[in-house]
Image (tube, helix red, strand yellow):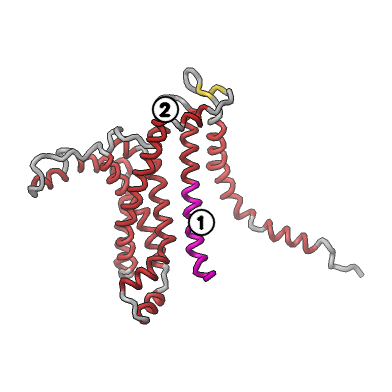
Amino acid sequence: MTSTNHPAAPAARTVRRGLAPVPFLAPGMIYLILFMALPVGLLAFYTFFKRGRFGGIVFEFTFDNWAKLLEPLYVGVILQSIVLAGIVTLLALLIGYPMAYAIAGLSPKWRTVALIAVVLPFWTNFLIRTYAWILLLNNAGWVNQWLQGLGITDAPISMLYTPQAIVVGLLYMYLPLMVLPLYASLQQLDPSLREAATNLGATPWRAFRTVTLPLSIPGALTGCIFVFVPAMSNFVIPELIGGGKTIMVGNLVRDQFFEARDWPFGATLALLLTILLVIVIVVQTAVSRRLTEGPRRG
């Protein structure tokens, strides 16, 4: 009689169990390799070569592109981009949190209506929405007409083609990306936690501060990433609403590729932007994990 308990059987079962998810993961992994890993790898490859005399790439190894990033001009553009994207993210958080909190407290019927209103701007083309702000903010636009009509100002205020106009445009474009993850986070909160705090004598403000706010921080951090990342790399709004007077990293990358034809330095800027965004995402993930696991360990 032959025994069925072969010594290699447990190991084979372990290998088969480990390979079971591969067919499901394969499409996503192929997509990431083709459209994420390979382009980023190509960018990293180009950063170590020289620009050709008439554009293109000369394959002579150099670190000049990375050293060029330390020039005051480019350091200033990078810092300016971080500051503007940070201001947009902060304003989106301050405006988006009350919006998400109010939506989460609505009845199911009105909650659906409110969510549709939040995402409604995404149903219109990005450029059309950008040009609409040009019509609103120019000297003869509706905003100046209202201000003069109400007697607040005597003459038109120059609002278009300023850094403030860029902040307004970016905030309008990306505010829904802050509201939606915040709403998802607030919607998942267990109402019994707030009820327990209230039953123990906490005021509504203290229940919000000690229960709702800490538990919604992961959603707020996700919203901050969703707003900061596209705001940092946007080049259409600084070009159209900002009039090209305020240069951000996205504009710089586009100019290096399409105007200066300096692909190696454009690749260096694009790779630097990718590295900065990865760092931000890693920090956000670490903070979220710490906030989530902290109470469990306690």
Which residue is nearer to you in this view: 144 or 265? 265
Residue 210 in the image: above or below residue 232: below
Q: Residue 216's x, y, as percent?
A: 40, 64
Q: Is residue 91 magenta?
A: no
Query: Residue sitting at 68 percent across and 58 percent down?
Result: 18
For mark 1, what is the residue? 286
In the image, is residue 159 above or below residue 52?
below
Q: Where is residue 99 in the image (x, y as percent from the top left)?
A: 30, 61
Residue identifier under label 2: 258
- Say whether disc 1 or disc 2 marks the residue closer to the N-terminus: 2
Residue depicted at x 52% and y 27%: 64
Mark 1 vs mark 2: in front: 1
Q: Residue lying farthest right?
A: 1
The type of residue carrying mark 2 is: Phe
Instruction: Give left or right: position of 280 versus 37.
Output: left
Classified by dominant secondary structure, the portion drawn in magenta counts as: helix
Res. 22 in view: yes
